[in-house]
Amino acid sequence: MTSAAKRGFDILLVLAALVAGWQALYHVAGETALTSPAQTVAYVGELFTTKSAMFGRHAWETGRAFLMALGLSYLIGLAIGVALGAHRLSGAVGEPILVALYSLPKVTLYPVILLVFGLGLSAKVAFGAIHGVVPVAIFAMNAIRHIKPAYLKTAKTMRLAPHQVVATVIVPAALPEIVTGLRVGFSLTLLGVIIGEMFASKQGLGFMVINAINLADVETMMAVALILFVAAAIANGILLWIDHRLHKRV
Amino acid sequence: MSRIGWIRLAVLLALVALLEILVRIGSIPYKTMLPPSEMLTALVRLLAAGTATRDIVQTLTCVGAALVSSVVAGFGLGVAIHRFPRVRRALEPFFATYYAVPFFIFYPVLIAIFDLSLLPIILMGFAFAVIAMCIATINGLDRVPRVLGKVARMHRMREFETAVRMKLPAAAPHLFTGLKLCVAYSFIGVIASEFILAPSGLGHAIAYAYNDFDNRTMYALMLFVMIVVVTLNMLLHGWEQRLLKRWHGR
């Protein structure tokens, strides 16, 4: 076997072990706690076919909130990151504050968001966005700050106009790190939106899961969790691929 | 304190003062936000009255349990995985996906298995933190210069001595990163779980106060969580700096 094939085989082995573990847990914990892998996949099929109207409504609600939150985190995060990266003093002052914000359990702040925005879509969007903004800002700030001074000096020697410096030097040099930040921000924004839905919402996939647990509807809970899990894993895989390619190029 | 430290303090104080003024003059409605000074007095009163003590003790116990178990298990796992490159290559895609999936979606499954006790809460904190420590350990061991192994052999050190006196200090910066992430993630895991569904604990108390329109208690408890997390981070940072200085002479 080639090394790539061997690695692929090993990865499949790990995946098989995970599914086997799930199956074993099902036998130990019983039907009231969780469904087996086969049952869950079958129910996922049902959600996409016979129950697609109901599932689609919730999925659309989550998707919409997530896209808005993502747009906001990227916009605000990049603005903060670029500003702090470009201005040395503000960066030195702001970085520890950003890092402290990153490690705060932001769930504690959810009630404040609810008080400010009220129940509903805007609260979810805001909550998702506050999760995503900080990593995007931190990565963008470091990306710009760590551009090699030689690049900028070369640009100066070549007498590039400011817009040329941005387009041909700063953006290509900082892009790989910025994209890493966007990837981390993507995951955290999704996490924020889902937690927001689990705590105070009447719509969305997070609500579906928490509602299912309250109704002891194990099938729905497991199936929706699996769908979210797989969707997030695929999205991350794509972003990771882009990320690696950009890092290799430089 | 350095000049930058003073500027940072001034910026933070200005932000707090701005919030205080905005609430006092009514630009931010009183029912949405308390002035920071009142949050502080509410917290002092709450702590003196002792009504929140049980929740505080419970949450800190859960965080402590999650933190210790995740650091120990994550470190052990990291060391073990680092020894077997084949296992490591197979696990890498799973590590890269781990923090990209909205984990809390599985909290209800844990409740279904273990009932509504402290165990699912601790497990969430553990699960959220353990992989960060594991990844940090692997990264740290990767960065141990090979010459250190040769030096150890020249001095005829035993394996244990090599590990403690050579590898550990060399890997320390990454281990500290892991430790700091573990602190943040255990807090997030525990408090978010308590928030979503729990019989007691700080997260639950905050959610309960929110549902009860009891802003005073809610903001007091939020302030408490912020103070604890920030203080803990600062202590860790100080300890890190001191140890690194001793080991690396910087």
Image (cartoon, rainbow, N blue to C red):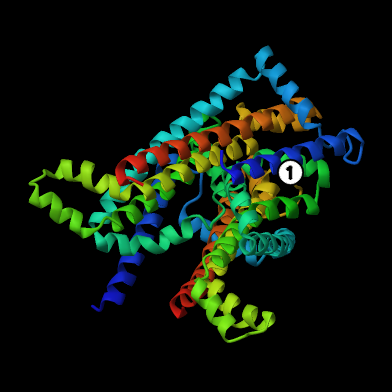
Tag 1: amino acid: Ala
The chain under label 1 reads A
Above or below, B43 relative to B176: above
What residue is shown at x 67% (from left), y 54% (from top)?
A205
Is B192 in front, or is B110?
Answer: B192
Image side of residue B33 versus residue B230, left or right: right
Let me know if residue A90 appears in the view. Answer: yes
What residue is shown at x 46% (from left), y 80% (from top)?
A249
Image side of residue B149 versus residue A93, left or right: left
Is B101 in front, or is B41?
Answer: B41
Above or below, B28 relative to A206: above
What residue is shown at x 51% (from left), y 46% (from top)?
A34
Outermost residue to the right: B26
What residue is shown at x 79% (from left), y 29% (from top)?
B215
Element type at mark 1: loop
Residue B9 screen position, x and y as percent:
66, 39
Residue A78 screen position, x and y as percent:
66, 64
The part of the image, by quadrant, that contains residue A48 is bottom right
Image side of residue B140 versus residue A213, left or right: left
